[in-house]
């Protein structure tokens, strides 16, 4: 094994090609050279992702029974059974500034905009939007320079940042959960191809990009010489890990290419190039992109909106033909509530897919789920009443071994959700004194 090549392999090694860079996953060969420190392994970074769902949940079918480690998953959360010991389920957390607090209607816009900011959005449909910095961007401001991208923001619905989308609130509030500053949303990317290019492309010229897309060449083709040199220099185990990683990259590219050329099922609707028309395929692609983003340490901070606030998408794949938002005003109609619970479970199944991918991706002596914190939830609980207390919140992952998982924690009602965000920031190495209406750091140990 060539020590000259190995000496250049570090946690942020990037394979280079014409106009292209591809970061590597963590390899055994990235440890301190055996001759110098045979038992020393790198410290894996901690990652955080915040995943937003719209319109709240049917809470009596969401909440587990029991408490602490002696709890049983609810019907909606059953798809997470394989990860019961890898997560925390919370009750009692509140996002107070998603409430009207004198501003009248507009709970869905406040749901999204206050979810990660913990701040009261200014009620306006004009350009004078203002809410607060979101927790992902507060953390990125402190540690984002440690990776190639400070953060990545993804979504399923395109949305828009202008106009009136909810009772006098700007569409910017409904379409974004990530805010770089109080007045600047960090717009999400919904096109898988563009998200992938953001992660693995470099400042190549428009002509270079057009040539690559025209020839349908893989990013792996451009870094093949560099990849072959690395493969010759690492152990057999690392070669297998590289092969698995390269295969994942190629499969994502192939699926993006198929989505670009597939006929669109919905007439009179212009879809951005590369956006699948099938929701399950779209969400799976976005979760796969998040996986490789974390696996390559391209970024450690991410957000994903599975729908914009107030989304009225139907879910024919689970035989729900009515719009989600329309159903959420169910007025205790049992048939409507059953359909919403079906949507809730369907989205949890999508989330379960991501957790399985994280847990099956080894990193050193552990895995990506162990070294991550994945928040899933909403700043609305009961969509019919537009409640913003006792929120449906899950935190999956062990935070690098700093979180005692496998518990259902029932906090006193009105416990600020922002207390949880402070605890997450601490584990990211980005200690914050406060966030939104926080009153302390939530104990996760």
Image: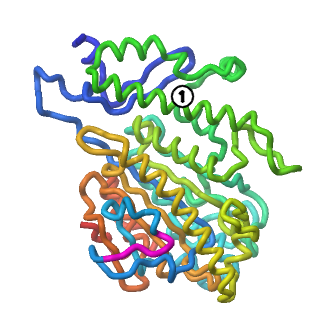
Q: Residue at x 27, y 73 (%)?
A: 69
Say if 367 sits above or below 388 in the image.
above
Question: x and y percent of residue 282 in the render?
Answer: 63, 48
Magenta stretch, overall SS: loop
**In the depicted view, which residue is nearer to us: 445 or 241?**
241
Q: According to the image, label 1 marks what residue?
A: 250
Q: Residue at x 54, y 28 (%)?
A: 250
The reply to whether residue 173 is visible in this rendering is no
Residue 307 placement: quadrant? bottom right
**In the depicted view, which residue is nearer to us: 353 or 365?**
353
The magenta span reads: 71-77
Q: Residue furthest right?
A: 268
Question: How is the rendered protein coloured?
Answer: rainbow
Using residue 369 as the reference point, say whether residue 51 is left or right of it: right
| Mark 1 neighbour density, 10 Å: few (under 14) some (14–19) many (20 or more) | some
Please identify the quadrant where the C terminus is shown. bottom left
Please identify the quadrant where the N terminus is shown. top left
- The reply to whether the magenta stretch includes residue 72 is yes
SS under mark 1: helix
Using residue 172 as the reference point, say whether residue 440 is left or right of it: left
The reply to whether residue 38 is visible in this rendering is yes
Question: x and y percent of residue 239 in the render?
Answer: 34, 22
Question: x and y percent of residue 82 in the render?
Answer: 37, 59
**In the depicted view, which residue is nearer to us: 252 or 271?**
252
Q: Residue at x 19, y 27 (%)?
A: 32
Q: Residue at x 44, y 61 (%)?
A: 375
Question: x and y percent of residue 333 in the render?
Answer: 68, 87
**In the depicted view, which residue is nearer to us: 227 or 303?**
227
């Amino acid at each position: 094994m060539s020590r000259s090549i190995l000496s250049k392999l570090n946690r942020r090694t990037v394979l280079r090609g014409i106009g292209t860079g591809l970061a590597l996953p963590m390899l055994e060969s990235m440890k301190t050279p055996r001759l110098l420190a045979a038992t020393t392994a790198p410290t894996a970074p901690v990652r955080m992702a915040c995943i937003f769902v719209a319109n709240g949940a049917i809470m009596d079918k969401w909440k587990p029974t029991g408490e602490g480690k002696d709890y049983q998953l609810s019907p909606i959360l059953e798809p997470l059974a394989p990860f019961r010991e890898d997560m925390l389920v919370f009750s009692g957390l509140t996002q107070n500034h998603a409430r009207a607090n004198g501003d009248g209607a507009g709970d869905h816009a406040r749901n999204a905009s206050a979810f990660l900011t913990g701040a009261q959005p200014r009620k306006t449909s004009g350009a004078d939007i203002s809410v607060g910095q979101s927790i992902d961007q507060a953390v990125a401001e402190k540690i984002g320079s440690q990776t190639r991208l400070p953060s990545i923001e993804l979504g399923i619905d395109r949305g828009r940042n202008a106009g009136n989308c909810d009772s006098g609130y700007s569409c910017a509030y409904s379409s974004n959960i990530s805010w770089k500053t109080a007045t600047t949303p960090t717009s999400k990317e919904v096109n898988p191809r563009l998200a992938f290019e953001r992660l693995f492309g470099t400042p190549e010229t428009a002509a270079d990009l057009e040539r690559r897309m025209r020839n349908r060449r893989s990013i792996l083709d451009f870094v093949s010489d560099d990849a072959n040199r690395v493969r010759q220099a690492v152990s057999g185990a690392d070669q297998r890990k590289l092969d698995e990683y390269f295969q994942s990259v190629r499969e994502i590219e192939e699926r993006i290419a198929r989505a670009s050329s597939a006929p669109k099922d919905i007439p009179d609707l212009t879809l951005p190039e590369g956006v699948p028309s099938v929701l399950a395929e779209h969400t799976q692609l976005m979760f796969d992109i998040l996986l490789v983003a974390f696996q390559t340490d391209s970024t450690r901070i991410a957000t994903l909106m599975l729908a914009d606030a107030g989304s009225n998408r139907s879910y024919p794949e689970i035989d729900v033909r009515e719009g989600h938002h329309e159903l959420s005003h169910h007025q205790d109609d049992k048939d409507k509530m059953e359909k919403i619970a079906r949507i809730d479970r369907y989205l949890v199944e999508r989330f379960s897919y991501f957790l399985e991918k994280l847990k099956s991706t080894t990193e050193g002596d552990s895995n990506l789920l162990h070294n991550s914190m994945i928040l899933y939830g909403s700043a609305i609980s009961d969509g019919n009443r537009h409640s913003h207390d006792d929120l449906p919140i899950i935190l999956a992952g062990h935070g690098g071994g700093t979180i005692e998982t496998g518990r259902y924690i029932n906090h006193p009602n009105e416990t600020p959700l922002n207390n949880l965000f402070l605890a997450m920031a601490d584990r990211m190495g980005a200690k914050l004194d406060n966030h939104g209406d926080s009153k302390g750091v939530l104990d996760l140990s």
